Image (cartoon, helix red, strand yellow):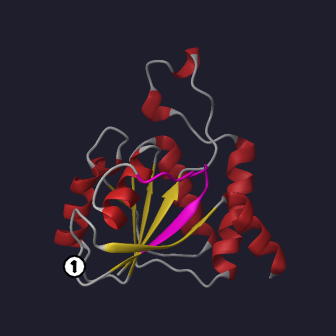
Amino acid sequence: MNLFILRHAEAEEKGPAWAAKEEERPLTRSGAKKFRAAVTGMDAMGLSFDVVLSSPFTRARQTAEIVMRVLKIARRIVYTSHLEPEQAPAKVIEEIRHAHMDHENVLLVGHEPYLTNLVSLLVSGADGLRLEFKKGGLCKVEIGERLEPGRCGTLKWLLTQRQLILLANEK
């Protein structure tokens, strides 16, 4: 199984307008535009996803929806509270094990520092792996024989949104 892990694109800044509604902060217009270009880079790489799981927070939902539209994926997005920022990464691993193990390419869309903690758990077995997971960044973790909380995957690559846009421009 390949887990593709995507940080949401650029969102509105935290501030008075969003103080009580953190989960409702949307993408900025420029963030959505740049991210659409980045997804064109995913297309140039030949990426496709059998299932897309997303945090229900607005900025993650909007990011997942852009992926679906640009890559013309006709399936529905699975929204899961297990990808919310304060959750334990082991919970989404369990959800995948129970409901999505028959898929080869699984995309997870979420937030930092949650995503770095998830990648760290999968490739090193613990927290503490130091990654710079930028907004709109995508990484690939290849899972070995079993998906489990602990050292079960190999980090194949981590691309920034800018690198994905450059890939799109090479097409």
Q: Left or right: 71 with respect to 150?
A: right
Q: Left or right: 2 with respect to 66?
A: left
Tell me if residue 37 can be seen.
Answer: no
Residue 61 versus residue 123 in the image, above or below: above
Residue 131 is a magenta residue = yes
Q: Tell me the quarter of the picture where residue 10 sits.
A: top right
Q: Left or right: 17 with respect to 100?
A: right
- Helix, strand or loop for the magenta stretch, by majority: loop
Q: Left or right: 130 with respect to 36?
A: left
Image quarter hosting the N terminus: bottom left
Residue that mark 1 sits on: 146
For disc 1, the neighbor class at 10 Å (few under 14, some 14 to 19, many from 20) is few
Range shown magenta: 129-141
Tell me if residue 43 can be seen.
Answer: yes
Residue 78 versus residue 70 in the image, above or below: above
Image quarter hosting the C terminus: bottom right
SS for callout 1 = loop
**Percent position of residue 77, x then y:** 40, 63
**Percent position of residue 102, x then y:** 26, 83
Residue furthest out toward the top: 16
Amino acid type assigned to the residue bearing label 1 in the image = Arg
Residue at image x 32%, y 38%?
A: 86
